[in-house]
Amino acid sequence: MTDSTTGTSPDGQSSKDSNGGMWLGLIAIVLGTFVSVLNSSLMSVALPKLTAVFGSDTQTMQWMLTGYMLASAMVIPMTGYLGLRFGNKTVFVYSVAGFTIGSVLCAIAWSDTSIIFFRIVQGFAGGFIMPVGMSIIYTTFPKSKVSTAIGLWGIAAMVAPALGPTAGGYLIQYYSWRWLFLINIPIGIFAVIMGNILLKNSQTKKGVKFDFPGALLSMIFFGSILLALSKGQSEGWTSFYILSLFFVAFFSFLLLLWVELGTETPVLDIRLFAIPQFTISTVASCLVMMGMMGGSFLAPLYLQNIQGLNAMQAGLVMMPQAIVMALMMPLSGKLNDKFGIAPVGLVGLTILGVTTLKLHLLAADTPNHWLIWIMSIRSIGIGLCMMPMTSAGMSAVAPHQIGNASPLGNVSRQVGGSMSIAIFTALMSSRQLTHGAHINESVTVDSLTASNAISAISGYVYQSSVDMSTATGAATSMVAGLIQKEALVRAIADTFYISAIPAFLCLPFVFFMGSKKKAAAPVQPKKSDDGKASASDSPGAVSLQESPGTVKA
């Protein structure tokens, strides 16, 4: 918003136009967020295809995902400064435009090196979209409407990851891999046009000093910690490479704290953690993100590696939970406004924790309809608790600090999500080895069960015109594969069990996030000696709570 004071005509027409513009402007924010999140989930199913197209290897092409993640995380802390210097609308529009241009470049890539480089460029532009979009919502909408607006915005952030595998598998199977990027272009252009027309720019402040040391240290810290978490399993957690990254992350974090606490205009305002409700909300939302990522990470692994589904089929199985979550996001905002964060959060976290525990019962022959029902009910819990918890922390921050609080919360959740995937991957691998060893001890090669299975399979293979020794070797390999498959199923089930813990850990936090406040009774302004109303005597004369940029007289 360009003006700090907004007038309202007697008939309220100006207020109605303003409200209409707010909700239409939200469309641009939702579209921008949707296209950036969708593109990341599209890439998860494209690696095998792109590896074959460019004649590369999986380890190299993995940098297409890692590079984007690192680039987007490294620029998030600068969102607050850029929003203050140039305005949130300007940052959002240019960020979506840069992301769209990056999509064009990725679509015309000619080698593995070029597409990795263009994905990094895309990440540098797209990293601003979510935090600045959240800042626009909190500084534009009245407090009474923020929960609903955040719920609608959350649809894009939560539904796009579920749509990605299905859409990506379809595009790769029936069209060209280039459509994975070309599909972003019309959505991005539309979001830029809508944002440029409908969004109002926030107040800008020229002459703000940019915190170069803080920006550099934040980029080093977030880059090294996220790279270590993403590569730890493949490189080895005790390898020199990973330990060096953790060493760099640790000392860059200490220097970052020292620099940011000693400057007046920090690029990452760590002082915001002095606000108890913001700190509790950030920690709780990180824990919910960790619990949510357990299902998002483990369910596709189960469907593809155990059930034998391809990426598109696995995406279709995951689709109902995305639809349920989309319906719950705006509903959770209304419930939060009506009942407060405590009851809504308790119900949501309980559903999330109990249903995640239920996934511990997964077996190799579990029917997909059972999994769909459990994941859909689980999505109700996620929808009820995720956005209200985020809103509780942001509502405790002063309006002029929203631009700094949004990137701080976003980058914290991103680190929490990456950490959860690293922990769950290591845990799953460890449990798979443990279960594999136990099964091998129980079912030895000379046991009656194994002998009968090998004999039966050998006889079947022998009918395919191969000699008996080859048939026996094939049967033994098949039995070994079944043992490893069963070990993986049990490992995934164990990891689901552990991933429920963050949801239960969050339960006490909801009691410290404030409660529903009763609407204050209107206060009649006192009259001064000359008969005129005195604004200074009226506590309700100036309201900054409904809209940070609007003053009501």
Image (tube, helix red, strand yellow):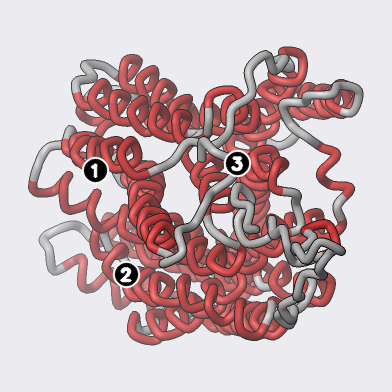
Q: What residue lies at 59% left-to-right and 45% top-to-bottom?
A: 5
CB within 8 Å, label 2 to label 3: no
72 to 300, vertically: above or below: above
- Number of numbered tags placed on the structure image: 3
Q: Which residue, given by chain and number where applicable, does mark 1 sit on?
A: 187
Q: Which residue, given by chain and number where applicable, does mark 2 sit on?
A: 319
221 to 367, vertically: above or below: above
Precedes in sequence: disc 2 or disc 1: 1
Amino acid found under the numbered disc labelled 2: Met
Outermost residue toward the front in this view: 530
Secondary structure category for the residue under label 2: helix
296 to 71, vertically: above or below: below
Secondary structure category for the residue under label 3: loop
CB within 8 Å, label 1 to label 3: no
Q: Which residue, given by chain and number where applicable, does mark 3 sit on?
A: 4
Residue 387 x, y percent position in the rendering: 58, 65
Distance CA(mark 1)–CA(mark 3):
32 Å
Precedes in sequence: disc 1 or disc 3: 3
- Asked if residue 433 shows in the view, the reply is no
User: Which circle marks residue 61 in the picture?
Assistant: none
Amino acid found under the numbered disc labelled 3: Ser
Q: Is residue 221 left or right of residue 16?
A: right
